[in-house]
Image (tube, grey):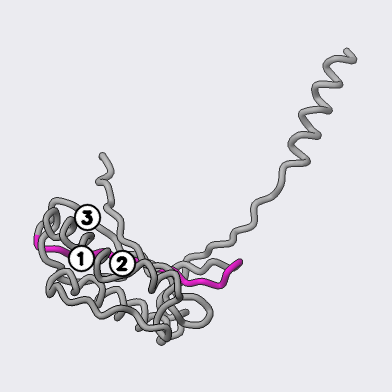
Amino acid sequence: MKKAITVFLSVALLFSCKSKKHDTIIVLKSNDIEIIKSNKAYALGKRLLEACNTSKFKPFSSKEATESVIKNATIEKVTEVCKKVNFRNGKFISLSLIDISLNKTTNDYTFRYAIEYEKKLYKRELFVTINEENKVSAIATKEVKEKPL
């Protein structure tokens, strides 16, 4: 009997000590966003992807992006990524906004776009993060795997 009570109390204590999760990331509607953030995310994302079509990349300025993004988005790196993406996906056609999320901890907005390419074999998405200073603090593209039915 003592053993059963001890096990029950141990389990109860374990569940009562479990930390509660606080949602730090929320999904927003496009009308809840400052138009400046939305326009900047779209323009800089599109500029980066169009560089793959033209082979002419204009590096980001310190007014547009953080130092880490400027350091990582060099002409050489962009050219290398563009070669791989163009081979698999063809030429870039357009961007469509999927959703916008806000990280309440850092106050960063992440814009997620569907990328349309010539070849429809592989789906890709673009993620552009805008910080409090209205600068791009992260920009990345990712291939999206098809979900089985």
Mark before the other along the chain sequence, 1 or 3: 1
Mark 3–mark 2 Cα distance, whole angstroms, equals 11 Å
Which one is in front in this view, the residue at disc 2 or the one at disc 1? 1
Q: Is residue 13 left or right of residue 119?
A: right
Q: Label 2 belongs to which residue? A: 113
Does the magenta portion include 40? no
Mark before the other along the chain sequence, 2 or 1: 1
Q: Amino acid at mark 3?
A: Lys
Q: Is residue 16 left or right of residue 134?
A: right
Label 1: element kind: helix
Q: Label 3 belongs to which residue? A: 123
Q: Label 1 belongs to which residue? A: 79
Q: Quadrant of residue 140?
A: bottom left
- Quadrant housing the N terminus: top right
Mark 1–mark 3 Cα distance, whole angstroms, equals 20 Å
The residue shown at (11%, 66%) is: 91
The residue shown at (50%, 75%) is: 131
Could you say where residue 85 lies in the image, as x and y percent from the top left?
Answer: 18, 58
The magenta stretch is 105-118
Could you say where residue 109 lies in the image, as x and y percent from the top left?
Answer: 47, 72
Q: Quadrant of residue 112?
A: bottom left
Q: Amino acid at mark 1?
A: Thr
- Quadrant housing the C terminus: top left
Label 3: element kind: strand
